[in-house]
Amino acid sequence: MKIISRRTLLFSIITAALVALFFTTSADAAAPSPNDISTSTETFLDDSPPPPNRDSCLHCHIKGEESGVWTPLSRWIVFGTAGLIFAFGVVRSISAWKTRSPWKPLVARTAEWVDERYKISGPLSKVLKKPIPEWQRRWWYCLGGLTAFLFIVQAITGVMLAFYYKPTPEAAYASIQFIETEVRFGSAIRAIHHWAANGMVLMVVAHMVRVFVTGAFRKPRELNWVSGVVLFIVTLGFGFTGYLLPWDQRAYWATTVGTEIAGSIPVIGELALLYLRVGWNITSLTLSRFFALHVLVFPAVIIGMMGLHFIMVRRQGIHKPL
Amino acid sequence: MNESKSQDEKTVPFYPDHVAREAKVALGFAIVLIIIGIIGLFNPVGLEQPADPMVTPAHVKSEWYFLFLYQLLKIIPQSILGIEGKVIGVLIPVIGIVLLTLWPFIDRKPDTTPKDGRKRLIIASVLLVIITILTIWGGVS
């Protein structure tokens, strides 16, 4: 039966040695030396220079003729124990190093930490490792992905522009001028947003033509086609609402013409016009509405629809044409 | 035939092979966009005069992707078979969108020969050519 552990034993030995050392040295210092008569305690308290070093008997010390506890034997015990502990530590360190678990980078350990708690590596790797047939390695199968890429570009640059844009008729024009002249890289961001928007319309149409020509809209992918049509309309809606935001002549009159076209649809036309313009004319209310549609409604719709679109593609795979 | 089929059946994992492939194309696009941005730094998209409801510019145009609709409305005759031409001009895109949405429920017969795909290619090309012509016409007029 183990009454005290090895660690406690070692610890108590070291403590005992240190305590013994402390008492011998402190007792030595406190005791008045018998061979020094000239320095008494009274003079020591005065501002006299410190007493000279007492001539301690070094060779007596070495030969072990000293009468204190700090004898060679005790020194051998104390330093010997310390040495043994050190050697033991070295051995333990070597064995710990030899039996260490393999080193992992911080990223891998973080991933393990997350996976241990949320157990996502299984389903995630199933999603990521899905085999993609080689016949899909044709340029027309990446049009949809490029549309998604351009949407991400639009989202990022759009947020950047929204930091400076002011959706009121008085301030909109000036804020675009501010973006183009004062904001660092503002004109570059606006140029990218402008041209990527046009590119996105082109890509959507190209993707749609590809799906149409390869016949990918047929059973079982009907709903994916429908969601694609919604995405197409929302993309055009993005373009239509975004065009008004600079509030210059081109924007104003293009919107006038566009809403007029919507207004001449039979039956629902007038309602559509009133809804789009918020009244009979294009005013600050129109600008607010277009801005809200452009930055709040359409992004929500397009992200939701894109999610559905991608999930359905993942579920069903890409249609293989004949 | 058999050999090409086995070539077709070969697969690569989505991640990292397929993603890397797509990323390369996206990177190409990103480079183009950065070049557009650099050009935009020195040559901004710019603005016209501030909006003025009182002054109608000489050439009012919509965005290029609505231009074909606009041009269609302009060239359509005043009245067709007693119906106002403008109404028909507006109904065409509306019907087009409805048709587009419902297309998978209309065209349901699966392809039997590669020729069926070619037929649709011809339909799409004709439509695209018409739209392109109308867009260019609208752009220059």
Image (cartoon, helix red, strand yellow):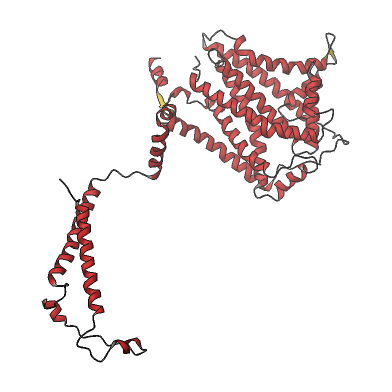
Which quarter of the image is occupied by the N terminus of chain B? Answer: top left
Q: Which residue is at the front of the view, A130 or A104?
A: A104
Q: Which residue is at the front of the view, A174 or A38?
A: A38
Residue A306 shows up from this direction: yes
Specify whether A313 is left or right of A260: left
Could you say where residue A42 lies in the image, as x and y percent from the top left? Answer: 32, 88
* Numbered disc total: 0
Which quarter of the image is occupied by the C terminus of chain B? Answer: top right
> Which residue sits at x=38%, y=41%?
A108
Residue at the far bottom in the pictured view: A38
Q: Is residue A33 above or below residue B93?
A: below
Report which quarter residue A170 is drawn in: top right
Q: Which residue is at the front of the view, A319 or A99?
A: A99
Could you say where residue A308 lies in the image, as x and y percent from the top left? Answer: 56, 23
Q: Is residue B129 above or below residue B45?
A: above
Could you say where residue A168 lies in the image, as x and y percent from the top left? Answer: 77, 40
Q: Which residue is at the front of the view, B45 or A267?
A: A267
Report which quarter residue B59 is drawn in: top right
Specify whether B140 is left or right of A100: right
Residue A242 shows up from this direction: no
Specify whether A100 is left or right of A281: left
Report which quarter residue A192 is drawn in: top right
> Which residue sits at x=78%, y=32%?
A286
> Which residue sits at x=38%, y=35%?
A116
Q: Is residue B25 above or below residue A182?
A: above
